[in-house]
Image (cartoon, rainbow, N blue to C red):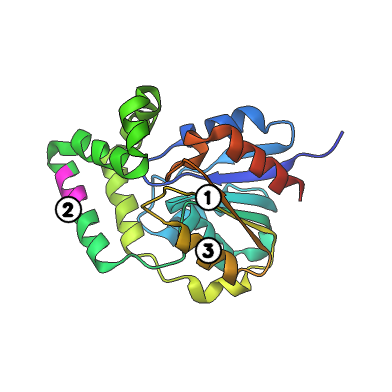
Amino acid sequence: MAQKTPLLMLPGLLCDAALWRHQLDSLGDVAEMTVADMTQDDSLEGMARCALENAPERFALAGLSMGGYTAQAIMRLAPERVIRLALLDTSARADPPERSIVRREMVARAEDGAFEAVIDEHVAMYLPPARVAGDPALCEVVRQSARNVGVASYARQQTALIGRPDNRPNLPDISCPTLVLCGRLDQTTPVEHHQEMAAAIPAAKLVVVENCAHLTPLEMPEAVSAVLRYWLAG
């Protein structure tokens, strides 16, 4: 029987393990999966160090959005521990100043009692309009994950995202096999950001999932699980 690959999975902003539910259910024959807690730190380096403390000595690493930024921090801190890397719906760029302003405003509103409205705005940012209008079950998974994260952790996560560095100069140093995957309709971290990363990482392969936006593992679970299975197999 083939040995399973240790796989550390990093959720995005306002996401919890439900982001990876299909992968957790379907990849257990090839991977020993762990979902990191991304709620306790207000910096990417803090999230990365916490994840590393609880990770196997060597592991495959997959991160979406904020999890992808944290995965890049792990590659800066301990690249020798990562045997393969998957960056989903993320970017290597620093937070634009205008986006940081919006983040601070959303945190202030959440802390002032409007967290449900802020969650609804995130759902509208993350999912295509057709899914928001026509897939209430998917929307509720996203909303419930955000409630599980909570206001205090949301504030910490946004602080971490505001403070993230421009990681593009470090991408050529990533030497492990790397998957760069995104939804064609992703407006939060658009396709060109992934093309940029894939071009800069020497051993990278780019996959673009059609009819899908920012939360690819939830929106197109079978497709993403199939790609991750292929990636894990090397």
When asked about the image quadrant of residue 126, the answer is top left
Label 2 packing within 10 angstroms: few (<14), some (14-19), many (20+): few
Q: Nearer the viewer, residue 214 or 211?
A: 211
Q: Mark 1: few, some, or many residues within 10 Å (few <14, many ≥20)?
A: many
In three-dimensional space, the C-alpha distance between marks 2 and 1, rounded to whole angstroms, equals: 26 Å
**Where does label 2 land, which residue?**
105
Q: Residue furthest left?
A: 112
Q: Amino acid at mark 1?
A: Gly
Labels 1 and 3: the sequence-earlier one = 1
User: Quick one: label 2 or label 3, which is nearer the N terminus?
Assistant: 2
Looking at the picture, does residue 163 appear above or below residue 1? below
Residue sitting at x 61%, y 64%: 78
Residue 197 picture location, percent across and down: 54, 65
Q: Which mark is residue 63?
A: 1
* The N terminus lies in quadrant: top right
Q: Which mark is residue 195?
A: 3
Q: Amino acid at mark 2?
A: Glu
* Amino acid type assigned to the residue bearing label 3 in the image: Gln
Q: Residue at x 37, y 39 (%)?
A: 127
> Which residue extends farthest bottom?
169
Q: Quadrant of residue 203?
A: bottom right
Residue 213 placement, left or right of 83:
left
Q: Which secondary structure type mostly characterizes the magenta part of the structure? A: helix
Q: CA distance from mark 2 to mark 3?
A: 30 Å
Earlier in the chain: of badge 2 and badge 1, it is 1
Residue nearest the observer in this picture, 138 or 157: 138
Dividing the picture into quadrants, the one containing residue 2 is top right
